[in-house]
Image (cartoon, rainbow, N blue to C red):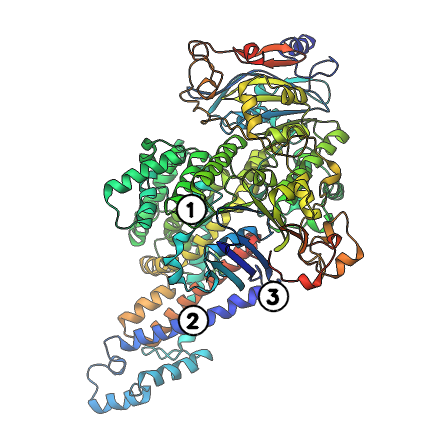
Amino acid sequence: MNSMMAMATDNRAVPLTDGPATSSPLLGVEDLGIAFGATKVVEGLRFSVDPGRTLAIVGESGSGKSITSLAVMGLLGSSASVSGRALFRRRDGEVVDLLRLSPGRSRALRGDEIAMVFQEPMTALNPVLRIGDQLVEVLRNHGRPTRGAARARALEMLRTVGIPDPESRLHAYPHELSGGMRQRVMIAMALMLEPGLLIADEPTTALDVTIQAQILLLLRRLQKSLGMALVFITHDLGIVGQIADDVAVMYSGRVVEAGPARAVLATPNHPYTRGLLGSAPQVDASGTPLPLKPIPGIVPSPVFPPAGCRFHPRCGEAKAGLCDRTEPVLEPTGSARGVSCLRWKEIAS
Amino acid sequence: MRRVLDPVLQIVPTVLVVSLIAFLLTSLLPGDAALSRLGLDATQEQLDTMREQMGLNDPVPVRYLYWLGRAVTGDLGNSLRSGEPVAEVLARRIPVTLELAVFGTGLALLIGVPLGILAAVRRDSWIDVATNLFALSGMAIPFFWLGLLLIMFFSLHLQWLPPSGYVPFFENPVRNLHLMALPSLTIAVAFAATLMRQTRASMLEVLNADYIRTAHAKGTPPIRVILHHALRNALIPIITVLGLQMGTLLGGAIVTETVFGLPGLGRMMVDGIYKRDFPIVQGALITIVVAIVVTNLLTDLCYRFVNPRIR
Amino acid sequence: MTRPLLEVRRLRKTFAPRRRGGSPVRAVTDVSFDLREGEVLGLVGESGSGKSTIGQCLVHLHRPDGGEILLDGENLATLPRGAFRRRRTAVQMIFQDPSSALNPRMSVGDALREALRLHSPHAGRDVIEERLERLLRLIGLQPEHASRYPHQLSGGQKQRIGIARAIAVEPRCLIADEAVSALDVSIQAQIITLLGDLQQSLGLTMLFISHDLGVVRYVADRVAVLYLGRLVEIGPARDIFAAPAHPYTQALLAAIPDPARPLDESAILDDPAGPDPRAAGGGCAFAPRCPHVMDLCRKDQPFLTQVAADHTCACVLRKIHPDRQGETV
């Protein structure tokens, strides 16, 4: 076990956290590969997250970020072949590889030690079951709570996520709640057993900006009070700045840039990160909007990925003969950061 | 309360229209009721008296209102053949058909829904292919042929079950179940096939829903995900099909009762038609239609119960 | 000043209650604004603010219960359906979900040809083909995209087609209803830039409906803010962003995600219940959520009051001028 944990730390090409170098991270994903038949949708993926910290995984639709979270949860169907390791430190200290767990052990972790919140609060709750029953089910899946204890816990969680009049909400059906309220219920459900790791897959994308801000605030508060690790998946760098400690930018199934969120947002090294930043609405100190600089084109299909650097067809900095031939690897750029670009030094200077 | 009362009140006009159709169908059919009652050697005088007595000389609307007025009080007239009140004949016949329908529906549910779930969960496996084959043949085989096949196999070949006859349940339950087994299976097969296909289709759709992923993410045991989360939602269209198929089921009952010699509503109607016994035909027809309307009402109420979104 | 292209006057729309015994939903209450020739007006608010209902009233997807919609002086609100159909190319809509707004069995070229023919029924084949090619280039696609079907396109490309179809008939004004909300930020930036370019080159007049002030800032010349079916603030975009007068506008601004700015906890409307038409009673609809709420707010409905040139706001904090009630903005 010790050697496993040692490997988990040593193997990180880029230490993603700038915190003190303690033992192993709560979740360390190494060389993760996901393929459907011959189509590789994720390759060589590497990230880690510590308790009490938030890692944002950022990328456009089709970058492989959601499929990565499903792989870690053990929710990918049998049609996917998964390689690599996802080492998770359990409450009792045991380190398990989430990708190699039996279905039964994987299920025992889900909802208990690892939980997930999804994008569409409108469809993620079962429409024919009462809110209270859906909350209590988490406890039933992982133990034998008494009716009273289960109900009390459900009430407590509804209160924790700030749902007004929780007693009557227990008996409500999902369609009787607003979108923001439903997402709060989803969060309450995910946190019923105080998991060590919460994966939130675009939890605010379907919501109004005002509700989005509320949910972000709620997640941040809960994370601090429960000391859990949060993996926050989003396509919006604007949100990263508001919630994340660390960030991993994904493009076409790989991490192209990673590091502390503030540093990456302030001085992005990868042209793709710059493109995402240029796409996010921003204002300068005086409040005037900075002009949008969108990235041209779209994410390539994983069936026919471009040769060389996968971003080169959309990259303004691409150099013919180099970027379309050689595939870059994630290399350290100092102070806990890494970038996967052949020309990042030239671009920076 | 209005939730329940409203649909109940809505069936009144339906039943009225149906009663009119039933009345018109039987009174406009070719054939003379007075003649069929008196026999071919009756004199013209006798016939005229009988027509007058039976009210056959009144205009059709008058006859309908007259008939309806009595029908509402439970008087559906008397059989032209035996003179027995139609209501009494019905009281004897309804339990037979009811038993057949309940057993048939129960069997169909027991066969169709689990097979449909299995086919959806093991999609594209040999189970899926086999059940689909069963469904296709089940829907294609006519009732009478299936009934004869079952009689040949189970009664003549294996000699397990009697081929025909009827004993009321409360007289001899074991014998009754023996006699009802084959007829019930006959009408259940096609119904089960339809239910299976609907169950498979709606389960497949539901299993792809986001909330199923949520259920898995909560660590819910797979069996519970299927039966509690998926089936609860898939039931909504299944119940609709269940209601819509009632007509087919009762139609099947008519044929099946004839094949197996069961003294039910279907046989009553068929015999009535052969013997030009119009009050009997009207009574059976109205009863069957009311049964279908009431089933649809029950379906509707069930639907509201299963789907909280339309309450 | 010349007459505005579109004048909305005291528009009202109430929906029947969803369930028996429920109270009717007042989606839009006495909303008045102008859409001036060549400008982009941002219409902003949360779900349930009535912003989409207004857009749908403008293209006759809903019939308003009261008020006027004057296009070049003609009242669209009372126009019979047939008469409206003849004028329907005048107002065009770009929808939120480009996937469901396109016919999956119609190629991009055919969908656009149909729109082009609607505009000029007597144009020859070559003219249509030439216009089709020009249209595709205008929205940043290539002529070969004409033979594609919607499922072969990305979300961003589909939205470009949605825009092309709307501008193909050269409408008097465009309504973009959450046209970029369903898109990734990177694609959203592309579409916003495209809309900006089109607006510049074609001089489009547009009502840009969105819940995201961060996006509206990039396209709108003026901004109108709705809360629970009422207009609470309207003014030049520069003013609204620099000095938002209404507390709700301030909250909307604070909620914009900005990579360089951490979440301002104090400015977030942290009430999970959200907008509730019943909670307001007779007073200001925003009072139950307002950080600056006073007793007065719960009693009286505030009027739109001028706070700067061309800039009005309905908030007690901005003083009440009853004599300005109903004045158009």
Residue A58 at x, y percent in the picture: 58, 26
Residue A121 at x, y percent in the picture: 59, 41
Q: Residue at x 31, y 66 (%)?
A: B270
Secondary structure of residue under mark 1 = helix
| Label 3 Cα neighbours within 10 Å, binned few <14 / some 14-19 / many ≥20 | few
Quadrant of the drawing holding the C terminus of chain C? bottom right
Residue A42 at x, y percent in the picture: 50, 20
Secondary structure of residue under mark 3 = loop
Position above or below: A250 against C163: above
User: Which numbered disc, 3 or 1, marks the residue that appears first in the sequence?
Assistant: 3
Q: Chain letter of disc 3? A: B
| Label 2 Cα neighbours within 10 Å, binned few <14 / some 14-19 / many ≥20 | some
Instruction: State the residue position of label 1.
Output: B198
User: Which numbered disc, 2 or 3, marks the residue that appears first in the sequence?
Assistant: 3
Q: CA distance from mark 2 to mark 3?
A: 22 Å
Residue A134 visible in the shown view: no
Q: Going by the image, does A254 lie left or right of C282?
A: left
Instruction: State the residue position of label 2.
Output: B15
| Label 1 Cα neighbours within 10 Å, binned few <14 / some 14-19 / many ≥20 | many
**Amino acid carrying mark 2 in the image:** Val
Q: Observer-nearest residue: C242 or A179?
A: C242
In front of the other: label 2 or label 3? 3
Position above or below: A2 against B42: above
Residue B132 visible in the shown view: yes
